């Protein structure tokens, strides 16, 4: 690093001297990034709208700091200025050092990285500032290493939204009253939330008026169970209770099944949320009308969960939607660990543009339901191509489950629910229900297109694990930082993923980068998770062998060091193949934005959201290192792992860095949070 700093400093001095000699004012020179900005504490200050130039070399990372006011949108552009250079990426952090950043729905464009399916010289990303203060941009190589110096230009822009921002989450929601109309402005990186109080039995009618623009908002309602949640637009499925119909008028009606504060969410509409429109804005108005008990309850006795019609497994029920706002509820008893499938057929359809849809709720009022990875448009709703809608999931608790059917007025339909036995481990979809597995143990499981099997393994930092599998399933590994409940992504979010194997026919090895519980997630491979194979069962076997613990220095208490010790986000060639598969996920289409946007997220999450990248290798010196430590870092770059027990503390730190680098080979760079089903 000393050699690099000298060369960069000398070059900068020559440029300044040349500029002054040519009579150029200093204002025409772009802000140049000092290479002393290798940590958040030493970040280079930049102004909004002013380009900052920098260079990323081997094991390098640059930090930049910018002041942003609460409620303003943040939009960052990173452009590579070196021909035939390596790919770069960036991440955004708030003033507390927490990583932020929303994603467009298409997930194919260069969101936060130039290493994307749709390649280019620039990467983009943004969010809404939820507090005033200093925000940070971290720039580094998109891959694990970089073979040649790559120059870049970074620009951060801000913009005013509306007077209600920031109202991204329920805890910052803007209160809205009955019979009130509220105006707002939405951008591709903005999520607006409004709170409305409802009593059980009250009916809310929500009408939206959107500005005529290529970029469109989309409105839906979540229940009181979201009051303490951090909502991700790609993982709102378990909270959503009503939404506007895709492609129809921007209006919906919902009768509250419980008393409490509900939340209106205004998100970018699925197909209009692209990287091209990520920084665009659109105006909207939301009107809310709240009335008493539903007047239709006397004539239609199944329009609420409390009046749901009981149905039996394997029997077909026929009914009709009698009015514009009619919804029919059904009750069915299911056992924990079963698989269930539901099919709704629009039996009298003549116009392909009409539709019928359904949702499934567990006994705790959480909306559930998985979907195939290929995103068929008739999952949970009919489509112009098919009058059949279907869905499925694993039952996670005994009791009465509920199905709500809604759609166009006059639609006749049939409903059939079937169940299937899986394996003795189900339900093991979440960390709290994961099946514990020990070293030397082999498990034999059964998987369907809608099943997600999770196994828990207790590890010490530095232990190496070999997972051997057969059956052709996909395997993902998460560290102990995984949240509980885990967002029901098809994959494991990159924020806590440490390894993966696209096809589990062989051995996957990884090293524990921290002490704690690790989770092995088995899912159907991407190419097999289709509408045609969604209900099929396939067996698999998986065995685990844990080797001895490596000698590693304990983590420090320095916040910057903690960040440098995070699981890296970039992988070897095998994981890059997974990234390409993920990026080739089909576009969600315009069928059901709530379910669709969750499937493309992002990576939400979590949620949603891009993985934490490893800075340990790039931050191998700090302000407190003495000259001896700097010289050791410079001279031992290629051979620091070969030192013996007599090495000093500096050598130990170098070894720890190498251990983290070994771990980084197991991580991945995926940006998607999910292929799980949602309605926003």
Image (cartoon, rainbow, N blue to C red):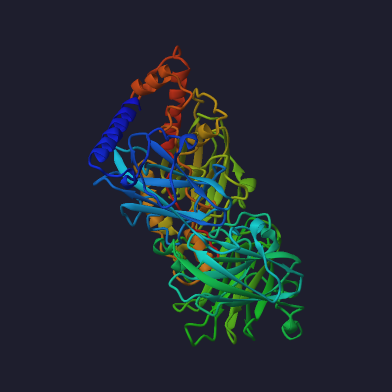
Instruction: Answer with left or right where residue 421 lies relative to residue 669.
Output: right
Q: Position of residue 220 (x, y in %)?
A: 59, 69
Instruction: Answer with left or right where residue 573 lies relative to residue 402.
Output: left
Q: Vertically, is 389 above or below 151?
A: below
Query: Residue placed farthest to the top in the image?
Result: 646
What residue is at 22 percent from the left and 41 percent from the top? 22
Q: Vertically, is 120 above or below 437?
A: below
Q: Vertically, is 388 above or below 278?
A: below
* Quadrant assignment, res 244: bottom right
Quarter of the image with the C terminus in it: bottom right
**Exactly how many numbered labels are in the figure?**
0
Quarter of the image with the N terminus in it: top left
Q: Position of residue 432 (x, y in %)?
A: 64, 46
Between residue 315 and residue 611, name the one nearer to us: 611
Q: Position of residue 343 (x, y in %)?
A: 56, 72
What residue is at 31 percent from the left and 26 percent from the top? 3
Between residue 146 and residue 62, name the one nearer to us: 62
Q: Position of residue 354 (x, y in %)?
A: 51, 82
* Quadrant assignment, res 458: top right
Instruction: Answer with left or right where residue 546 lies relative to residue 337.
Output: left
Q: Is residue 602 visible?
A: no
Q: Is residue 38 visible?
A: yes
* Quadrant assignment, res 287: bottom right
């Amino acid at each position: 690093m000393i050699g690099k700093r000298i060369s960069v400093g000398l070059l900068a001095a020559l440029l300044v001297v040349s500029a002054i000699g040519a009579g150029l004012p200093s204002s025409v020179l772009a802000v140049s990034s000092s290479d002393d900005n290798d940590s958040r504490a030493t970040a280079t200050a930049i102004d909004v709208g002013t380009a900052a130039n920098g260079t990323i070399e081997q094991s390098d990372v640059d930090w930049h700091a910018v002041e942003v006011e609460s409620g303003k949108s943040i939009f960052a552009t990173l452009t590579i200025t070196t021909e035939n250079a390596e790919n770069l990426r960036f991440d955004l952090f708030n003033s507390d050092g927490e990583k932020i950043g929303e994603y467009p729905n298409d997930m194919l464009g260069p969101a936060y990285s130039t290493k994307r399916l749709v390649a280019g010289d620039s990467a983009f990303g943004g969010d809404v500032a939820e507090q005033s203060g200093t925000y940070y941009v971290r720039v580094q190589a998109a891959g694990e290493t970089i073979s040649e110096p790559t120059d870049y230009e970074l620009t951060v822009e801000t913009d005013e939204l509306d007077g209600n921002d920031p109202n991204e989450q329920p805890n910052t929601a803007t209160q809205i009253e009955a019979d009130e109309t509220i105006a707002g402005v939405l951008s591709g990186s903005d999520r607006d939330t409004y709170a409305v109080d409802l009593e059980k039995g009250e009916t809310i009618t929500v009408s939206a008026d959107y500005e005529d623009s290529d970029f469109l908002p989309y409105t839906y309602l979540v229940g009181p169970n979201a009051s303490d949640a951090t909502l991700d637009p790609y993982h709102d499925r378990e909270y959503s209770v009503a939404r506007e119909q895709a492609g129809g008028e921007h209006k919906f009606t919902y009768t509250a099944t419980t008393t409490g504060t509900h939340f209106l969410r205004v998100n970018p509409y699925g197909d209009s949320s692209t990287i091209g429109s990520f920084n665009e804005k659109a105006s909207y108005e939301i009107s809310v009308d709240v009335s008493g008990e539903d007047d239709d309850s006397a004539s239609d006795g199944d329009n609420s969960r409390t009046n749901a019609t009981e149905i039996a497994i394997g029997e077909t029920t026929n009914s009709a939607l009698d009015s514009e706002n009619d919804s029919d509820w059904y009750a069915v008893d299911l056992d924990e660990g079963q698989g269930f499938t539901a099919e709704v057929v629009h039996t009298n359809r003549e116009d392909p543009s009409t539709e019928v849809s359904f949702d499934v709720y567990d006994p705790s009022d959480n909306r559930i339901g998985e979907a195939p990875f290929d995103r068929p448009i008739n999952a949970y709703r009919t489509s112009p191509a098919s009058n059949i809608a279907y869905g499925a999931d694993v039952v996670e608790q005994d009791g009465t489950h509920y199905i709500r059917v809604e759609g166009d007025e006059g639609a006749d339909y049939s409903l059939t629910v079937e169940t299937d036995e899986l394996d003795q481990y189900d339900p093991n979809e979440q960390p709290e229900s994961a099946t514990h597995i020990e070293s030397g143990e082999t498990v034999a499981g059964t998987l369907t297109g809608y099943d997600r099997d999770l196994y828990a393994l207790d590890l010490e930092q530095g232990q190496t694990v070999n997972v051997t599998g057969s059956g052709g399933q996909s395997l993902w590994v998460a560290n102990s930082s995984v949240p509980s409940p885990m967002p029901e992504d098809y994959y494991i979010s990159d924020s806590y993923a440490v390894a993966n194997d696209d096809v589990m026919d062989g051995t996957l090895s990884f090293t524990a980068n921290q002490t704690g519980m690790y989770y092995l997630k088995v899912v159907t491979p991407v190419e097999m998770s289709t509408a045609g194979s969604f209900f099929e069962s396939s067996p698999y076997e998986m065995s685990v062998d844990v080797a001895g613990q490596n000698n590693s220095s304990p983590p420090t208490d320095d916040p910057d060091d903690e960040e440098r010790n995070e699981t890296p986000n970039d992988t070897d060639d095998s994981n890059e193949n997974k990234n390409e598969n993920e990026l080739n996920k089909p576009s969600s289409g315009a069928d059901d934005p709530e379910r669709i946007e969750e499937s493309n997220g992002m990576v939400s999450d979590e949620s949603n959201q891009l993985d934490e990248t490893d800075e340990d290798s790039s931050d191998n010196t700090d302000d407190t290192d003495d000259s001896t430590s700097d010289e050791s870092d410079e001279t031992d770059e290629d051979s620091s792992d070969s030192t013996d027990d007599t090495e000093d503390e500096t050598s130990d730190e170098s070894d720890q860095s190498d251990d983290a680098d070994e771990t980084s080979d197991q991580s991945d760079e995926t940006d998607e949070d999910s292929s799980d089903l949602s309605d926003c």
